[in-house]
Amino acid sequence: MSFGRLNALRLSDFRSHASVLVNAAGRSVYLFGPNGAGKTNLLEAISLLSPGRGLRGAAFSEVGRRLPGESVGRAWAVSAQVEAAPIDGVADEVQLGTGVETPGASRRLVKIEGETVPPGRLSDHLRPVWLTPAQDRLFLEAAGDRRRFFDRLVFAAEPSHAAHASAYEKALRERMRLLTADEPADPAWLSALEARLAESGALMAEARARTLSALQAEIDSRGERPFPRARISYAGEWEAMAARGAEFAEIEARLADALAAARPRDAAAGRALTGPHRGDLAVIHVEKDRPAAECSTGEQKALILNLVLAQAARLSRVESAPNPILLLDEVAAHLDARRRAALADEIAALGLQAFLTGTDETLFDPFKGRALGIAVEPSGLTVLDTE
């Protein structure tokens, strides 16, 4: 029995919204209205009910509502009623919440059933997966954008991946500070940092390799659909080792040795040139046998969407984890009518809950009768479909 659907969402002084309540009752929701009305803000609020900084990557001090003349954002809060894992076959709800208690605070509190908990605990109850307009140029931008996109898919399957990536980035920064300092770095301290990097990096590489293999298998099993089929690979030495079946200890040792050997080169370059932070996701349009970057804008959007749908489909069958929730911001902008209809059919067939945004109500005609329609205006929200 699945769980993890969002039943109700409440916002207080979040972005442009003073106070908002959305009673989704576990249904998909499409939000439409003019630019600047606050549609994406609702998706961002849901994304913050997971570890990290949400779909915009914003500092928590930036999301509090500010009126003209106010220089600091207000204290803000986001809370939700979410379907909990059933006990003895009986469904229940769990209350999730996050926010800051003082205006402009840079650290947020996270609460589950009123008890303050680490942000990582949110993944036990809600796992949003998102696609935003910022990712429309994913295949044309720098490798770091594709790496972050893929890591979000990995994280949706393995929440511990985020902690390993965070530990890796922290140790990487500390190592580079030592290497670029005016005084010679302490070799023992560098070795200790590189040991931490090797451990976290090997764990990251293994998780990426597992996700890549499982995601490709899911894409292949889905066959021909209105969304183009992708062939995916990951250009990274350490991920390649993991994919070949190398033992964790071997990857860890090889990475530690490589980091130690790269000290002079990294110091001269001012950045680390070796490690899992250098990898890149590659995507091929199977039917055309062309790299995604050479495809049309609409085809690129459809390829990205198919990756997200495939991962959501795979995760929806994991009974011990909450169902993924799709957050699709302006997703219909580059999809033709056939693919918009296919998207509605796919979400319904997979039994997923999705929150979608767009400026034009007609973009969501295929969702009518299957999802809750809400008009978003600067003055507030209007529910159009309660059936």
Image (cartoon, rainbow, N blue to C red):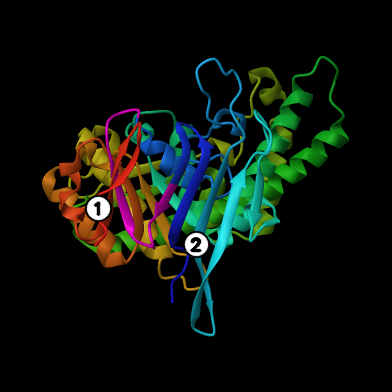
Q: Amino acid at mark 2?
A: Val
Tell whether position 31 is magenta: yes
Q: Determine the CA span between mark 1 and mark 2.
A: 33 Å
Please state which amino acid type lies under the numbered disc 1: Arg
Locate the C terminus and report the quarter of the image it occupies. Answer: bottom left
Residue found at x 38% / y 52%: 326
Q: What percent of the width, then of the height, locates residue 240?
A: 51, 50
Residue 122, given in percent of the width and then of the height, sits at 59, 56
Which residue occupies the foreground of this view, 35 or 167? 35
- Picture residue at 16% right of the left edge, 53% below the top: 366
**Left or right relative to 170: residue 124:** left
Residue 229 is tagged as: 1
Q: Where is residue 20, by image quadrant?
A: top left
Find residue 78 and report its horizontal and vertical position in percent.
Answer: 54, 46
Look at the picture and state if 210 lies above or below 49: below
From the viewer's side, name the closer residue of 317 and 322.
322
| Residues packed near mark 2 inside 10 Å, few (<14), some (14 to 19) or many (20 plus) | many
Work out which residue is located at the far left of the displayed protein and give it.
338
Q: Earlier in the sequence, mark 1 or mark 2?
A: 2
Left or right side of 349 for 164: right
Q: Which residue is mark 2?
A: 82
The furthest residue to the bottom: 88
